[in-house]
Image (cartoon, grey):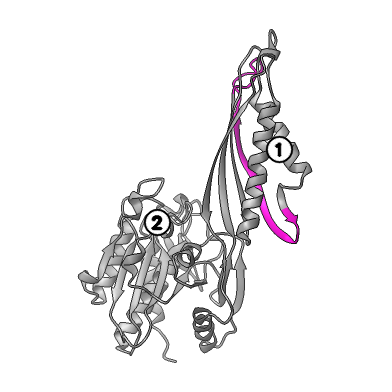
Amino acid sequence: MKSIDSKRAIDLVMRLMAVPGKSCQEEAIAQQVESELDAMGVATSAISYDAAHKRTPQPGQVGNLIVRLPGNRKQPRVMLSAHLDTVPICVGCQPRKRGQRIVSADAETGLGADDRAGVAAVLTTVHETLARGSDHPPLTLAFFVQEEIGLQGSRNLTVSKLGKPEMAINFDGGNPWKTTIGATGGERMKIRLQGIPAHAGLAPAEGASAIHAAGLAIAKLHKGRWLGDVRKTGQRGTSNIGVIRGGQATNVVAEAVEIEAEARSHNSEFRTAIADAMQQAFEDAANQVRNTAGDSVVASVVRRVDYDSFHLSEEAPVVRVASQAIRDMGREPLSSVANGGLDANWLVKHGVPTVTVGCGQRDVH
């Protein structure tokens, strides 16, 4: 197997990491990717954007960058993908080479290898393929926005722009010999408990405390083993109450509490069961806390599935392709299932079987 131009590849990833592009502000890095493609001779007509950024909870500068390249039409179309955005601490990154590693020159600034290393892997693959003029399948390149804030780019992807790829290799994560063939699903919840305020010293019974209701709900979930590592009826998942805001003063019966929580599981039905139990606990607790007039705390719950779980078979064509590519480099693939979300969660949901391969990042955030 002919080796790639490693110096060019390293220069490319360092160039990409120096370009700012936190979530929702990916325009500059998208333009850099366009510039790299132009230098390879990719036609402008092959490059387009969708309108994902207009459908996301937080508006962004640009949508997903999508490139469709011709190839041998007797072969199935293959997609290569990575995400453009980085976390905020990576803005102002100054990549430096230190031995065999690339690090940030400023210890207070992140490197942004997540996922500029993935973007570089896709671009390097295209460069080497075009430079060699070898027979290759039709290719789709997808560079997603807003991955770091809930996989929003891939979630809101305009699937029709992809050209119907039969499989995808997504570049993200660390170990380059690892093939992630499945991932958990996640659901987030925003819970508001609306109580009835009253003076806590003069007339506490006239109030209905939202904090009291929150405490009852959490205690019930703890006792029922619905918090943390959740294992029931042979299924396993996790849940967490991560944010609680409420109350105004010690002498006021708490009028309102806002809570943010999540549930996860590799089994979609069990993830829903965990979220159902959490919602029921807060609704029941709210109904229990009443004032002397008989009025209760009121619970309102908003739920959103961030991403659904998936698990590809070891015999799936895309898993075989990814595994063989790693073996061709003299390594044995390490098959894994992730406990967090990936763009692959939504790609599989959209009908594109996807394996995620690492790009060498370590301590990515």
Q: Quadrant of residue 31?
A: bottom left
Relative to 210, 350 lies left or right: left
The amino acid beneath tag 1 is: Ile
Residue in the picture at 75% in, 37% down: 219
Q: Which mark is residue 218?
A: 1
Given residues 322 and 9, the one toward you in this image is: 322
Point out residue 288 in the picture as x, y percentages from the top left corner.
71, 27
The amino acid beneath tag 2 is: Asn
Residue in the picture at 56% in, 47% down: 188
Residue in the picture at 68% in, 34% down: 284
Relative to 126, 357 lies left or right: right
Point out residue 200 in the picture as x, y percentages from the top left corner.
68, 13
Given residues 179 and 230, the one toward you in this image is: 230
Residue 200 in view? no
Given residues 286 and 174, the one toward you in this image is: 286
Q: Is residue 236 magenta?
A: yes
Looking at the image, which residue sits at the far right?
223
Q: Earlier in the sequence, mark 1 or mark 2?
A: 2
Point out residue 361 in the picture as x, y percentages from the top left corner.
52, 67
Where the N terminus falls, by quadrant?
A: bottom left
Q: Quadrant of residue 271?
A: bottom right
Q: In this picture, is 51 found above or below 200?
A: below
Given residues 89 and 179, the one toward you in this image is: 179
Query: In the image, which residues are magenta?
Result: 230-255
Element at badge 1? helix
Q: Which mark is residue 156?
A: 2
Looking at the image, which residue sits at the far bottom?
1
Element at badge 2? loop
Mark 2 neighbour density, 10 Å: few (under 14) some (14–19) many (20 or more): many
